[in-house]
Amino acid sequence: MEISHIEHIGIAVPNLEEAIKYYENVLGLKCYKQEVVEDQKVTTAFFKAGDTKIELLEATSPDSTIAKFIEKNGGRGGMHHIAFAVEDGVANALKECEDKGVRLIDKAPRKGADGLNIAFLHPKSTEAVLTELCENPNK
């Protein structure tokens, strides 16, 4: 697997509009895109900090993984995952990870926010950090 860069850092937030205000008004970043991802039951907002994106995630359903994450954190958000861009494709990276004994959340790539193909690795196999593998299908 060849990782080219950190694609984004995912941050769960209980209130997307309030979080956007902080990132824009305090940190001076600009939200360049908001998107609802129906199958993940989230609304996302994206910012760029240099070459790395920040993805804010707000739950759209109480049974979403983001809602459960926030509930576990006492109603507060926090860093949810780190995403790495892979050059040799998410499917190949998943196979390589599985061959090395890594527990997969996704057995195959799926569509994610911002037009990416994505898959997650289970934090029980990744030093307790939810890890996302990403590829831009238009590259």
Image: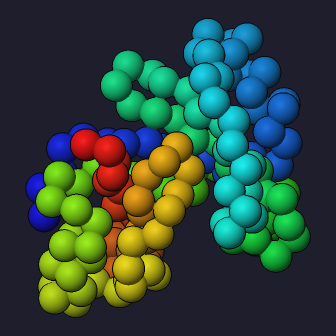
Residue under the point 28% across and 66% down: 90
Residue at 62% in and 16% down: 30
- Which x, y percent locates residue 37? 68, 56
Residue furthest to the front: 138
Vertical placement of residue 82 versus 21, above or below: below
Q: Residue at x 42, y 62 (%)?
A: 118
**1 vs 47: above or below:** below
Residue 100 seen in render: yes
Quarter of the figure that contains the N terminus = bottom left
x and y percent of residue 120 in the render?
43, 70
Q: With 22 as the anchor, is 91 left or right in this view?
A: left
- So how many labels did they put on this image? 0
| Image quarter of residue 75 | bottom right
* Identity of the residue drawn at 73% across and 57% down: 42
| Looking at the image, residue 51 lies above or below residue 104 | above
Where in the figure is residue 121, as x and y percent of width and height? 39, 74
87 lies left or right of 12:
left
Q: Is residue 73 visible?
A: no
Rendered location of residue 97, percent (x, y): 22, 78
Q: How is the image coloured?
A: rainbow
The reply, left or right, for residue 84 in relation to residue 130 is: left
Q: Quadrant of the C terminus?
A: top left
